[in-house]
Every structure is written in C-alpha cells, then in structure tokens.
C-alpha cells in the first residue's frame, strides 16, 4: 500500500506542479495582456494626438493661406483705392455746368464699374458720415465744432475685404469745443 500511497503523493505533487506551472503561465499571459492593453492605450492616445495635430495643421494652413491671399490682395488694392478716391473727388468737385459732358459721364461710369469690380472681389466700401468714430475703421484727420464724436465729412472711405478692414477712413469729426 505504501507504493500506492507513494504514487498518489507523486501524482499529487505532479498535479500541484502542473497547477503551479499553469498558474504561472496564466499570470504570465495576464501580464502580457496587460502590457499589450497598455501599449494599445498608448497607441490610441498617440493616434488621437496625431489626428488632432493633423487637424490643427490643416486649420493653420488654411488660415495662413487666407492671410497670404489677403495680404497679396491688400497690396494690389492699396494701389487701386487711391485712383477710385481720385475719381470720387473729380465727381464730387465737378461744377454743375460741366456734369452733362461726355468726359464727366465717362468718369462716373468708370468709378461705378470699378466699385462693382471690387464688390465682385469681396471688397466693400462704406460711408462714414453720420457715424460715431471707431478707431478700427476711422483715422481722424481734422476736428471741427460739431456734434460730439460724429463724423461730418470724410477724405477717404473705409474698405473691407471679407471680414477684415482693408483701409480705414480718413474723417473729419467734432473737436469737443
């Protein structure tokens, strides 16, 4: 009986060793799974950050592109706007008896055509007379006695390109005395 008992003990020890080995193997697999899950979480985080960086890069590139287009157009329009101002001064200061001539009509037509062309390019002119002074849109050139901070005349209109001020107006306002 002792042999049977010895064999049972050996079997029990083998089973214990096998159970211990299986437990160790299970724990190793658990550690590997946890490491893999940790690595997956890190990769997901890196992917999310990379996607956010890419989206930010796209937005920044679009903004930079819009800024570049704006400044290129700004340079061109700053050369054209004074010519439109000249035409407006000619129209405004032409004596009434000369307003029926062909040259005057041509100047008026040219000025209207240029303003329509600017409008098609998203450049809009604004009158300031009667408005209150806004430092983002107006540059005060002269002050006279009048209603407080009301613009009574303008030397040049202000223009906007898209949602940005292209040129501020040069205006005459009340001096507060």
Image (cartoon, rainbow, N blue to C red):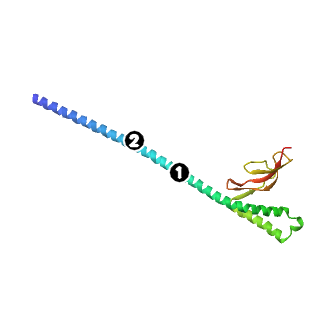
Residue 127: x and y, percent? 78, 55
How far apart marks 2 and 1 lie (CA) works out to 26 Å
At a point 82% along the width and 63% down the height, the residue shown is: 91
Instruction: Check disc 1 and report the residue beneath it.
Output: 55
Instruction: Identify the residue at image location x=26%, y=37%.
Output: 22
Residue 14 shows in this picture: yes
Residue located farthest toward the front when viewing the structure as drawn:
141
- What kind of element bears circle 1? helix
Instruction: Tell me: 92 left or right of 63.
Output: right
Residue nearer the viewer, 97 or 12: 97
| Residue 176 position in % (x across, y down) | 84, 44
- What label sits on residue 153 in the rendered view? none
Q: Which mark is residue 38?
A: 2
From this view, report whether residue 156 is shown above or below residue 16: below
- Label 1: few (<14), some or many (≥20) within 10 Å? few
Would you identify the image quadrant in which residue 89 lies?
Answer: bottom right
């Amino acid at each position: 009986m002792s042999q049977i008992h010895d064999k049972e003990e050996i079997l029990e020890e083998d089973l214990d060793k096998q159970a211990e080995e299986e437990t160790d193997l299970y724990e190793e697999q658990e550690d590997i799974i946890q490491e893999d899950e940790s690595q997956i979480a890190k990769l997901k985080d890196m992917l999310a950050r990379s996607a956010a960086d890419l989206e930010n890069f796209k937005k920044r590139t679009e903004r930079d592109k819009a800024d570049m287009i704006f400044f290129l157009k700004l340079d061109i329009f700053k050369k054209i706007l004074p010519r439109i101002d000249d035409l407006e001064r000619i129209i405004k200061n032409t004596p009434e008896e000369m307003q029926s001539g062909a040259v005057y009509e041509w100047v008026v037509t040219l000025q209207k055509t240029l303003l329509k062309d600017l409008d098609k390019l998203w450049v809009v002119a604004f009158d300031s007379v009667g408005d209150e002074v806004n430092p983002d849109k107006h540059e005060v050139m002269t002050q006279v006695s009048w209603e407080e901070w009301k613009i009574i005349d303008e030397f040049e209109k202000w223009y906007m390109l898209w949602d940005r001020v292209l040129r501020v107006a040069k205006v005459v306002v009340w001096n507060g005395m």
